[in-house]
């Protein structure tokens, strides 16, 4: 489901472990949790996690970039593919 391409940038770094990340085995569970409680949904290996704005900064990204709202704060199944591409480029630059 969604984007699980090995060519994509890594969306979890060890510095994010200090934040409260909610971990899920299934995308649907992560999506529902993100919609209910907010946050940013990302893939990680064979699972998913939802995290907070401060953790997004650890990726070298601005958590208040308008493109997050455009993609629905969902990296896995973004609502707007162009906004997702812009964020992806910013993440690649940050690497």
Image (spheres, rainbow, N blue to C red):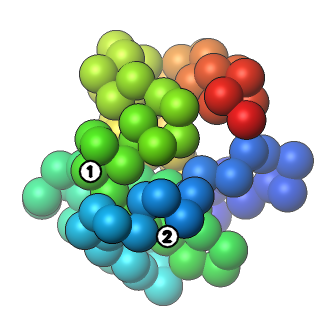
Q: Position of residue 75 (x, y in %)?
A: 52, 45
Q: Residue furthest left?
A: 37
Whole-number angstrom distance, CA of label 1 to CA of label 2: 14 Å
The residue indicated by pointer 1 is: 52
Residue 83 vertical position relative to residue 49 in the rendered view, above or below: above
**Residue 25 appearing in the image:** yes
Q: Residue furthest bottom?
A: 25
How crowded pointer 2 is (Cα within 10 Å; few <14, some 14-19, many 20+) is rated as many
**Could you tell me if residue 81 is visible in this image?**
no
Residue name at image x 54 percent, y 65 percent = 14
Instruction: Give the residue displayed 29% in from the left and 22% down from the top.
Output: 64
| Vertical comparison of 73 with 67: above or below | below
The answer to whether residue 8 is above or below residue 72 is: below
Estimate the x, y position of residue 95 in percent, counting from the top left.
73, 35
- For the residue pair 66 and 71, the one nearer the viewer reads as 66
Q: Are marks 1 and 2 in contact (CB under 8 Å)?
A: no
- The vertical placement of 59 against 18, above or below, is above
Measured as percent of width and height from the top left, residue 38 is found at 17, 50
Q: Quadrant of residue 51?
A: bottom left
Residue 48, numbered label: 2
Callout 2 secondary element? strand
């Amino acid at each position: 489901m969604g984007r699980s391409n090995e060519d994509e940038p890594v969306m979890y770094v060890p510095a994010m472990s200090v934040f409260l990340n909610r971990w899920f085995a299934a995308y649907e569970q992560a999506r529902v949790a993100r919609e209910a409680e907010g946050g940013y949904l990302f893939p990680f290996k064979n699972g998913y996690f939802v995290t907070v704005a401060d953790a997004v900064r650890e990726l070298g990204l601005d958590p208040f970039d308008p493109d997050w709202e455009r993609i629905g704060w969902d990296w896995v199944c973004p609502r707007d593919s162009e906004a997702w591409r812009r964020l992806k480029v910013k993440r690649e630059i940050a690497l």
